[in-house]
Amino acid sequence: MERYEEAEKRFRATIKVNPDVTHKWEAYSYLARLDDLRMNYDDALNKFKKIIEKGSDEQLLEHARQSIEIIVEDKLTKQQLLNLNRVLGAEYPGDLILKRLIQIYRNERDIGNYQVALENFIVRFPDHGFSEEARLALQGLRDQEENGIRIGVVLPLSGQRALVGQQVLQGIQLAYSQFSAANKQQIKLEVRDSGLGRDATAVVEELARDPNVVGIVGPILSWEIQSIIPILEKYRMPVFSPTASTSGLADLSPFVFRNALTKELQARFLARYAVNHLNLYRLAVLYPTEYYGEILREDFEREVRALGGEIVTSISYDRKQNDFREQILNLGGVPDDRLKWMVNRFLRRGAKPPHLNDKGNISRPIIDGGLFSGSGSEGLKVALEVNYDAIFIPGFYDKVGLMIPQFAFYNIENVLFLGANGWNSPELIEMARHYLNSVLFVDGFFPEGKDPGTKKFVEDFEKRFGSKPTVLSAQAYDAANILFQAVLQGGFNRLEILKHLSGIENYHGVSGVTTMLPSGDTDRSLVKLSVREGRIVPVNGPNPPLD
C-alpha cells in the first residue's frame, strides 16, 4: 500500500509540473490503473472515461477503453452496476453497464428485469450495435406463450448425420416421456436441428438468447463444441454433450460438460481394472499407428505406470497390415516346429531354458508333459511362457479378428487380451470364434446387460421405438436425466445448473456410474465384456473368465 501511495505522489507531480501533454495523460492513466489495483473501481472508471473524452494519444485511448470493458465485465458487483446504471443513463459507459446487467438478468432468469433492461437499452442506445440483438431477444420473450424452464436440444436431424442425431434424440425423448405430468409442466424441451443447411453456432445462440433456456444437450461433434465456446462464454450457457469425444475438449471452457465415451476414459478404466482388480502388473501393448490407437496407448501406459505396473514392451503395427508375424515374434511368439526344436535341444544338452528377463528373453519354452530319453521323446507337450501378464490391443475388430488367431499360431495363448470399444462387434466372433477364450474389452453400454436399470431402459426403449438402444442413446438418456434432475432439485437458472453439473457424484445411470471431474469430463464405470460360446457377454464378477 505504501508503494501505491508513493507512486501516486509521483504521478500527480508529473501531471502538475510536466509541460509535455502526452506525459501528463500517461501519468493520469497510471493513476487510473492504481485505482483499479486498489479496487476503487468508480474512481478508475471516471479517470479512464476522462482520458477517452479529452485525451488524444490513440494507444492511451485504446487502453482506457479496454480497461473500462474489463472492469465492467469482470470486476463490478451487481449493486455497483445498478448504481452506475442510474447515474450514467445514456452516457458512456452506460451501454456497457446495461449490457452487463442484461447478461446477469438472463443468467439469473430474472425475466421481469431482463425485459425492462432490454427495453431500456433500445430506448437509450437506438443506434448501438447491440440494439438489434436486444430487439430480437425482446421479441422472443413476447412470442413465448409461457415462461417455464426450458432445456435446449441441438442435434443434426437432417443431412448425413441425421441417424446419429436421431439416436441421441430418442434417448432424450425417452427420458422426458418418463416424467410425471407435473414435471412436464415445469420443464419443456426446445429441440433444434443443426443438420442440413443449419449452423450449430447460430442455433445455440438462438437458444442462448432465451433466459428460460437453462441448459443444452448437444451438440454431438467436437468441432461444433469448439465453435460455440464464444457463445457459451457470452451467455454463460452450460452444454452437456453425450457424444463429443475429442481429447481435452471439456478443458476449453467451464461451460462444457460431457459423458461421452472418450479414449482416455477407456484407457484409464482398463488400466485400473487390470492392475487393481486382476493383479496384472506386467503388460505389453500392440497398437495401430493411428490417432485412436496412439491416444489409447499413451493413456493406458501412463495409467499403468502411475498404478505401479510395468509396460514390458510397446509395439506398433500399420492399420493396413493383415499379417502380424513380425510384431508377434517381437512379443516373444514362437511357431510349433521352432518351439519343439528348442525344447529338444535343451533336453539333449541337459540344460534349462534361460530365465525370463527384460533384456531379450521375453519368452521361453516349457514342457507340459511327455517322456524323453537319449534316443528321443514320446508324447512331448510343450508350451510357451512369456514375461508379461496381458496384451493391450487398442485397435478395431477387423484387425483384432485377424491378429488373435495368429497369436495362437505363435503359441502366445496363456495371457489375457485387453481391448477397447473398437472390439465390440459380432464380426469379431465371426473372424476369430475359436480363439477368444481369454479376452476382455470395454464399452460404454451393453443392451444385454444384467443390471436392472439397464434392462428396464432397454425394454422401455424397444417398446417406444421398436429397436435396441445404442450407446449414444444410452448416454443421451443419462445426460438428459442429469439436466432434468438439476432443474427439479432447484436449478432455476443457468448459474444453478452450472453448479449442479459441477457437483455430480456417483450418478447411477444406464451407461454407468458417473462422477463429474473438475474439467467437465466424466469419470464413469464402463461395461466389461468377454466372449462365451460364440457370444459377446458382460463380465459381472470381479475377474474376467480365463481359460
Image (tube, rainbow, N blue to C red):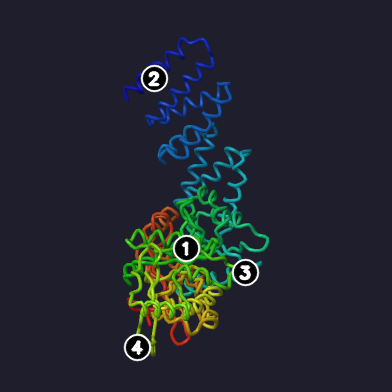
Return the x and y of residue 125 as percentages of the image width and height.
59, 38
The label number, if any, that marks residue 371 in the structure image: 4
Q: Is residue 470 above or below residue 502?
A: below
Amino acid type shown at disc 3: Ala
Between 304 and 354, the residue placed more toward the observer is: 354
Between 543 and 336, the residue placed more toward the observer is: 336
Residue visible at 60% across and 71% down in the picture = 163
Q: To which residue does mark 3 refer?
A: 162
Q: Residues within 10 Å of mark 4 (few under 14, many from 20)?
A: few
Q: To which residue does mark 1 refer?
A: 296
Return the x and y of residue 83 as percentages of the image width and height.
43, 36
Amino acid type shown at disc 1: Leu
Q: Nearest to the eye among marks 4 and 1: give it.
A: 4
Note whether residue 529 is visible: no
For the residues marked 2 and 4, what is the alpha-carbon distance in whole angstroms? 98 Å
The label number, if any, that marks residue 8 in the structure image: 2
